[in-house]
Image (cartoon, rainbow, N blue to C red):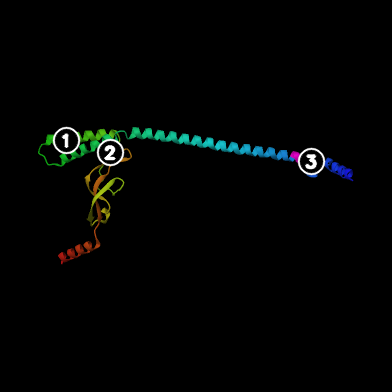
Amino acid sequence: MSEINQNDIDVKEDKPLASESTSPEEAIKALEQALQDSKNAQVEAEKKAEDVRLRGLAEIENMRRRAQLDIENAHKYSIERLSRELLSVIDSLEQALAVESSDEPLKEGVQLTLKLLLDSLDKFGIQQINPVGEAFNPSQHEAISMQPTQNPTEVNTVLVVAQKGFTLKDRILRPARVVVASAMPQATVVNEKSNVDEDLV
């Protein structure tokens, strides 16, 4: 009885399991899928590598442009510090011309000196800002006071320049200090009209 049972066991062990068998078609399909996955991974890796390369090139180009801009600004504004120091000299010469003097040769000499200095600065891109009669520009002008005006066309225009400004190329060295016209308060305008009418009567 025990021998029969042993033979049955031996027969069962010799039979292949159905779940472990794979057809050639399935094996080929699995290999093709593995090959496709490998190709997809390679394409993805190549895309990432190309993206990194392009980013690196863009960063290098940006650094080159920034360096070039720094060099250009260094050449363009290299005299900015000297220019600021010379502004006080120009102010002094203009103040000297504003003083009444009977010494005409001295006055002409100061005028000539001032003109030569301004012409020399102009060669280096330094120009004077004298905006009398122009519209107030907060990027170039500094309002030190407001003065009411009856003329509506003068509102927000520069009436007086207390101190001239200067530019270096497209950069403001010093804004012009100005007095700006403002609209006269309505009550004041009405009172002045009443006074005029009374005078006429």
Q: Residue 187, position in %: x, y?
A: 23, 63
Front residue of 32/164: it is: 32
Q: Residue 14, position in %: x, y?
A: 84, 40
Q: Is residue 184 above or below residue 158?
A: below
Q: Please report whichever mark, 2 or 1, sits nearer to the chain's N-terminal start.
A: 1
- Picture disc at residue 162: none
Q: Is residue 18 magenta?
A: no
Q: Is residue 20 left or right of residue 139?
A: right
Residue at x 24%, y 60% (from the top left corner) = 185
Task: Tell me the residue that label 1 is attached to.
Answer: 110
Magenta range: 23-28
Give the amino acid type for the residue marked by disc 1 in the picture: Val
Give the amino acid type for the residue marked by disc 3 in the picture: Ser
Q: Residue 201, position in %: x, y?
A: 15, 67
**Which marked residue is nearer to the observer: mark 2 or mark 3?**
3
C-alpha gap between disc 2 and disc 3: 90 Å
Q: Secondary structure at mark 1?
A: helix
Task: Tell me the residue that label 2 is attached to.
Answer: 127
Task: Tell me the residue that label 3 is attached to.
Answer: 23
Q: Are marks 2 and 1 in contact (CB under 8 Å)?
A: no
Q: Please report whichever mark, 2 or 3, sits nearer to the chain's N-terminal start.
A: 3
C-alpha gap between disc 2 and disc 1: 19 Å
Q: Residue 138, position in %: x, y?
A: 30, 48
Q: Is residue 95 above or below residue 149?
A: above
- Mark 3 closeness class: few <14, some 14–19, many ≥20 residues within 10 Å: few
Residue at x 75%, y 38% (from the top left corner) = 28
* Quarter assignment of residue 75: top left
